[in-house]
Amino acid sequence: MIPIRLAWYGCDLRTGGIVEDLPSLKPTGALSRKLGDATTLQLELNVAGAPSEWAAATDPGRSLLVAVDEATDTPIWAGAVTLREGGSATTVQLGAVTLERYFDSRFPGTQTHIGADQADVIAALATPALTGGPPITLDAVDTGVLMDYATQDGDDKTCLSCLQEVMALEGGPEWTIDVAWDAGHDGFVFPFRVRSVIGTQTATPEGVFDFPGCVSSYTRSESYEAGKGATVVIARGEGEGSSRLTSSAHEATALLANGWPRWEYRYSPATGLTDPDQLDAHATKSLALMQEGAQVWSVEAVASKAPRLGVDWFLGDSVSLNIETSPRHPRGAGVVARCWAWELDPGSDRVRPILVEES
């Protein structure tokens, strides 16, 4: 049993270089990450125990906080400082957000891609943010799937909104921003990974959580609430009334034939959509996710006893949950599902993978 202890570093946002070690910095909530989206974190810095350059190491808009697992020397979380508040108190409050948020402050300009590999489209949409920003490096592997995509500068769509739009398409590629030591081990780099599917998917994953065992509690959420369940999906684009671009009605034909009721869902997946094929691709993916409702396992485990985050399992990986018996599953249960997000609270020795069952 190895406890989770984090070393915190205040770094320069442009270079990733370490400005100061911050031993008196403590998160006041759980660290978290999710695929293709930003997460936030609140922290507290004890000024009395802080080094002399703590202010330069935590300057909003210019600095970056990185957490490293001391036992494995593995960087597991990084976030740009966006808020700092302090005064007569002995502590300074900080707010930070993962680097996906940076892409919501940059714009891709006008781009048109015809018959391009999905990974090339993602890379092109991200590239404008690589100039004058953090040391983000592209790690994009061809998916073998070609697509058309266009965006106009006048639409004011950010890089992040475009990236999320492509990821939301049927068969769309996945992306995430990791954190790693640089070659000199005196700073950090941030690989922007693009894959058909992020992580390792296998029926026999290394990350195995047991209840009872390292798992203290779990919940399986099955939801058919509005926006989470539907057997008929239509995606809407630009225009008004009868001239509005609309996908065909995508139906869960097998479920409907077996007696499921019609639950209809209409939505606009993004602004500026003018391609009917993209609307159909959005509707197809949404139906695949929604036709049997959302099925999510929220697991809380003792971090020091559980499979090690950043060693045994990563964001996007398949993770196994084995249940011997519980009130919800008296005869036991077992599931292998993907980790779409995670939370880590080292102060309470808790780790919480969020597992999604995929059809």
Image (tube, rainbow, N blue to C red):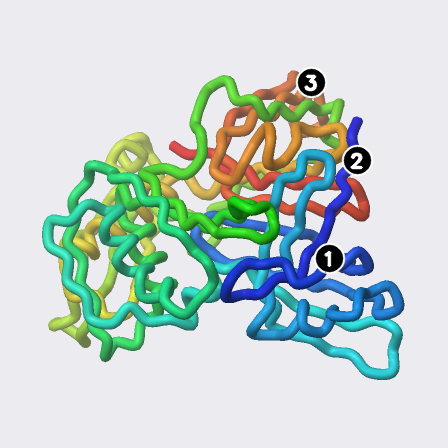
Using the image, tell me which numbered label, if any, was put on residue 85: none
Residue occupying the point 51% across, 49% down: 34
Q: Is residue 222 visible?
A: yes
Using the image, tell me which numbered label, if any, was put on residue 324: 3
**Residue type of the residue flagged with mark 2:** Pro
Q: Quadrant of residue 326?
A: top right
Camera-side residue: 110 or 316? 110
Residue to which mark 2 is pinned: 3
Q: Quadrant of the N terminus?
A: top right
Camera-side residue: 212 or 197? 197
Residue to which mark 1 is pinned: 21
- Element class at badge 2: loop
Q: Is 111 placed above or below 169 here?
A: below
* Mark closest to the chain's N terminus, 3 or 1: 1
Instruction: Answer left or right for 300 relative to 267.
Output: right
**Residue type of the residue flagged with mark 3:** Glu
* Mark closest to the chain's N terminus, 2 or 3: 2
- Element class at badge 3: loop
Instruction: Answer left or right for 118 relative to 187.
Output: left
- Element class at badge 1: strand
Residue 61 image offset from top left, x and y in percent: 56, 74
